[in-house]
Image: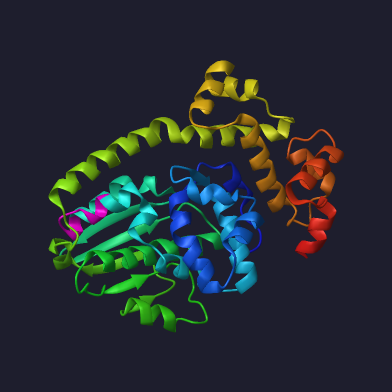
Amino acid sequence: MTNVLDISLAGSDHSLSSAYLASILPSLAEHYQLSVDDLLRDAGLPVDVLLQSQTMVPLADALKVFLSILAQTGDSGLGFEVGRQVRPRSYQVLGYAILASATLHEAIERLIGFEKLAGNIGVSEMQENGDTVRLRWQCPVTGEPARHLNEAAVTGWITFGRQLLSDAPQPSRVCFTHQAPVDTQRYLDYFQCPVEFSADFNGVEFSAEYLSLPLKSADPGLSEMMQREAKLKMAEYDNHTNLGAVVRREIYLLFVEGEPTLEKVAKRLGLAERTLQSRLRKQGLSFQIIVENLRRTLADIYLLDRRLSLTEISLLLGFSEQSSFTRAFRRWHAENPAQARQRMR
């Protein structure tokens, strides 16, 4: 993961559940001997975000946490290490719906059907071809971050699968589309099967016979209940959770025109200003806080681009003058933008 994120990520609807972060970040930080609180502060996230199990964290903000780890460790296998920390609670309702499934086939179907509950990042797909099954992960994110997202997703599948099956069999092969890292031995040691880099897909292949394997945690009664709960959560996600992401995207697009306002965003969404404000309030969201958080995320990314002057960054963030940007930046980081840029060197 390079030190510069694709700026469009900040205005996208890609997100990661805070439950996932809360599940993997403590053990990941312990693995690297880092402080969780420091990592969250570096990313501009509130420390209590890990306690907000129903929150979706914008992907650009979540990636800043992992960028901080990468900056301190230089570990090209960061995504692999993330995937090794996955537990059922990482996926909340989805995780428990999978745990209660009768067979591996049913578990995979639930993963595919409800994966947005864990994060709106990529799409899983199962392809059955004779006696072989291919589980693919397709991530729309490009560039260096995709490497780590792909490794985290695929490694997470295998980590979780081993918790579902007694004497879990090994896959036939694990594949990644990116180039091989310098150290491939840890991948081979962990997956216990051939690992292919520069492959034509991200995912895993295994024998079709595995699909009928029973899960050791199968529970018919709980399975039906968790299936219903997952369906309700998906409907809630589609109807409501996307609102914050949609508003964030519109604010991002409005920055080029200057200060984004609730009135402008409501108009772009075809809503009355009061209606939008009410819907945001019901979800515990504040328009001004969304603007503030997005500006902070963008500022951190823009400062890494040496081609941009501080005046240009101010305009890109919708500030009418550089002094307004400087005051806001001091509020976020207790230093001015010039000092931060020098430190980032």
Return the x and y of residue 89 as percentages of the image width and height.
36, 55
282 lies above or below 125? above
Q: Which residue: 40% across, 49% down?
A: 118
| Magenta part of the chain | 97-105
Question: 271 left or right of 223?
Answer: right
**Residue 126 location, quadrant:** bottom left
195 lies above or below 115? below
- Depth check: give the residue in front, 33 or 315: 33
- Depth check: give the residue in front, 77 or 182: 77
272 lies above or below 95? above
**Residue 213 location, quadrant:** bottom left
Q: Which residue: 52% across, 70% down?
A: 30
140 lies above or below 185? above
Count of numbered tags: 0
Question: 103 left or right of 62?
Answer: left
Q: How is the image coloured?
A: rainbow
Q: Is residue 7 magenta?
A: no
Residue 202 is at least partly visible in this image: no
Q: Is residue 103 magenta?
A: yes
Q: Is the C terminus in the top left, top right, bottom left or bottom right quadrant?
A: bottom right
- Depth check: give the residue in front, 299 or 306: 299
Return the x and y of residue 260 as percentages of the image width and height.
68, 29
Q: Is the N terminus in the top left, top right, bottom left or bottom right quadrant?
A: bottom right
Q: Which residue: 40% across, 70% down?
A: 199
Residue 31 is at least partly visible in this image: yes
